Image (tube, rainbow, N blue to C red):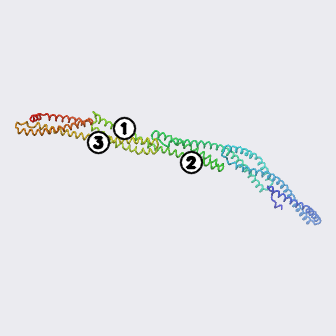
């Protein structure tokens, strides 16, 4: 029985049972005390009547038996004392350990529950104050753990090595839990403090971010319709570049708000976390839309600027040429209509030819205006589009007017040239006739004295007189036409030639009509 006994247990109930068993063993030994005394007395009597060898053997057996019994008795007494001491210390350990374990479990549960952070700053402050009291309570338990450690150390010295190891493990576990509880409580304190600060920062940053987004959306809305003027569009593009950089510069703030919100979501209720997540998602979506909108507006402005520059460059070059061409055409008109003008038909033809060539040269500019203008109107609707449409209409109208004026002037010059050629032809033809007729008169034979011959001469001169009379009427018509043409046409080298021919024709006509031969014929006729 003694050999099968285990060392005193660290468990109060077990050591108490061991003590009961030890009492039973001690009772067994006490019950055998009388038997041992009788046996010893009997052995001594036998040994006294036995021979020496047997006496020594009997005495040895009696001594061995007595030694064993004393060993059992002393061992039982010692174990009884050890068990009683162990039971007392185990009871003390149990009395200290159980409340501490219960308190520790309660505190662990409470710390865990307090990790859920409210989303209201006042409630967080209340929780901070509650935690401060709880943390003070946790720290105040350290002496109890120190006392428990002392009791456990004492108990480990009273129990077996195996039981001492188990006890050490239990003590280590509970002290580790207490250490973890202190750390968790400190972490909770930091969490609540950070949550309070983070919530305040989150609210302020969130509200500031929303206000900035609303302001930025309003500012960007001003660039929904771009200017159709180069300098103004360049200003808008620079402003959009600045706004785009400003939007990009707020990315860190958005990420900070989201990170703070995500961290806070780990410590709040599921319902509040869902609500907060919706707000964070809304902020991210709104910022993404804002970034895309700013980029799109800047890209739109960058794509529109070359179109605006192309349109206005073409329009300005075309307008400058139209102004110059209109002045030259007007000068031609004035030169053609005013008396005493200096531009001859040849010069006018050269001007018209140059203008016609310039029409072909500048028509591509009009094509660019007509092509880029409508594209610009689509990109910049509203007043800008109306302005561009006005410029397009005006450029086309002026260009068409120049084309029409050049065409009309060209036709007029062609007609004038044709009429001039016809008048010059008629004058040359009449001059040739008069010169030829005058030559015939000078070479004609003088009037004959023979009546028959003179009748023939008279008949011939009569025919000539009729021709002269006819040509005289034609001269009047040709001179009238020439005068009219000279009045309508500008002065030129052709005009001087025509005037010379007109004067020659007048002189030739006058000389022919007033020549001596004619007077003689008239005299004879009379």
Q: CA distance from mark 2 to mark 3?
A: 70 Å
Q: Nearer the viewer, residue 93 or 273?
A: 273
Quarter occupied by the N terminus: bottom right
89 shown above or below 412 = below
List the residue tagged with mark 2: 285
* N-term mark: 2 or 1: 2
Q: Farthest front residue? A: 526
- In whole angstroms, how far apart are the C-alphas of marks 2 and 1? 55 Å
Crowding at dot 3, Cα within 10 Å, few <14 / some 14-19 / many 20+, comes out as few
Residue 147, percent from left and from top:
78, 48
Q: Which disc is residue 411 wearing?
A: 3
Q: Nearer the viewer, residue 413 or 128?
A: 413
Q: Quadrant of residue 394?
A: top left
Decide if residue 474 is on the left or right side of residue 379: left
For mark 1, what is the residue?
A: 323
- Residue 158 placement (x, y as % from top left): 81, 54
Disc 3, SS: helix
Residue at (66, 44) in percent of width and height:
120
**Disc number placed over residue 133 in the picture, else none:** none
Label 1 sits on a secondary structure element that is helix
Residue 103 spot, x, y in % from top left: 75, 50
């Amino acid at each position: 029985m003694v050999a099968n006994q285990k060392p005193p247990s660290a468990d109060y109930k077990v050591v108490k049972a061991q003590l009961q068993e030890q009492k039973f063993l001690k009772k067994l030994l006490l019950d055998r005390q009388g038997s041992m005394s009788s046996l010893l007395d009997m052995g001594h009597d036998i040994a006294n009547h036995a021979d020496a060898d047997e006496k020594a053997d009997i005495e040895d057996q009696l001594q061995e038996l007595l030694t064993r019994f004393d060993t059992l008795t002393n061992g039982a007494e010692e174990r009884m004392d050890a068990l009683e001491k162990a039971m007392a210390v185990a009871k003390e350990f149990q009395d200290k350990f159980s409340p501490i374990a219960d308190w520790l479990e309660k505190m662990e549960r409470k710390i865990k529950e307090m990790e859920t952070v409210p989303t209201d700053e006042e409630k967080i402050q209340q929780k901070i104050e509650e935690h401060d009291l709880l943390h003070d309570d946790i720290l105040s338990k350290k002496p109890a753990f120190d006392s428990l450690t002392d009791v456990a150390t004492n108990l480990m010295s009273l129990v077996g090595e195996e039981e001492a190891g188990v006890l050490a493990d239990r003590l280590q576990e509970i002290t580790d839990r207490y250490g973890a509880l202190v750390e968790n409580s400190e972490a909770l304190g930091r969490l609540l403090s950070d949550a309070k600060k983070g919530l305040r920062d989150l609210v302020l940053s969130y509200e500031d971010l929303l206000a900035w987004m609303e302001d930025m959306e309003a500012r960007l809305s001003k660039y929904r319709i771009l200017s159709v003027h180069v300098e103004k569009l360049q200003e808008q593009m620079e402003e959009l570049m600045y706004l785009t950089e400003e939007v990009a510069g707020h990315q860190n703030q958005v990420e900070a708000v989201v990170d703070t919100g995500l961290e806070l979501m780990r410590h709040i209720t599921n319902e509040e976390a869902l609500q907060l997540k919706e707000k964070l998602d809304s902020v991210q979506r709104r910022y993404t839309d804002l970034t895309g909108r700013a980029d799109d507006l800047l890209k739109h402005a960058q794509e529109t600027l070359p179109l605006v520059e192309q349109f206005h460059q073409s329009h300005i070059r075309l307008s400058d040429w139209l102004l110059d061409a209109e002045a030259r055409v007007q000068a031609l008109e004035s030169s053609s209509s005013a008396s005493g003008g200096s531009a001859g038909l040849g010069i006018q033809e050269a001007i018209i030819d140059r203008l016609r060539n310039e029409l072909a040269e500048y028509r591509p500019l009009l094509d660019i205006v007509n092509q880029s203008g409508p594209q610009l109107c689509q990109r910049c609707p509203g007043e800008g589009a109306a302005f561009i449409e006005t410029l397009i209409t005006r450029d086309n109208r002026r260009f068409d007017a120049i084309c029409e004026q050049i065409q009309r002037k060209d036709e007029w010059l062609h007609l004038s040239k044709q009429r001039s050629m016809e008048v010059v032809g008629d004058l040359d033809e009449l001059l040739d006739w008069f010169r030829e007729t005058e030559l015939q008169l000078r070479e004609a034979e003088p009037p004959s004295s023979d009546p028959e011959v003179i009748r023939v001469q008279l008949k011939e001169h009569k025919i000539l007189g009729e021709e002269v009379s006819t040509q005289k009427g034609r001269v009047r018509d040709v001179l009238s036409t020439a005068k009219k043409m000279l009045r309508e046409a500008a002065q030129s080298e052709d005009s001087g030639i025509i005037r010379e021919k007109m004067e020659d024709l007048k002189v030739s006509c006058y000389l022919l009509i007033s020549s001596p031969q004619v007077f003689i014929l008239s005299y004879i006729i009379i």
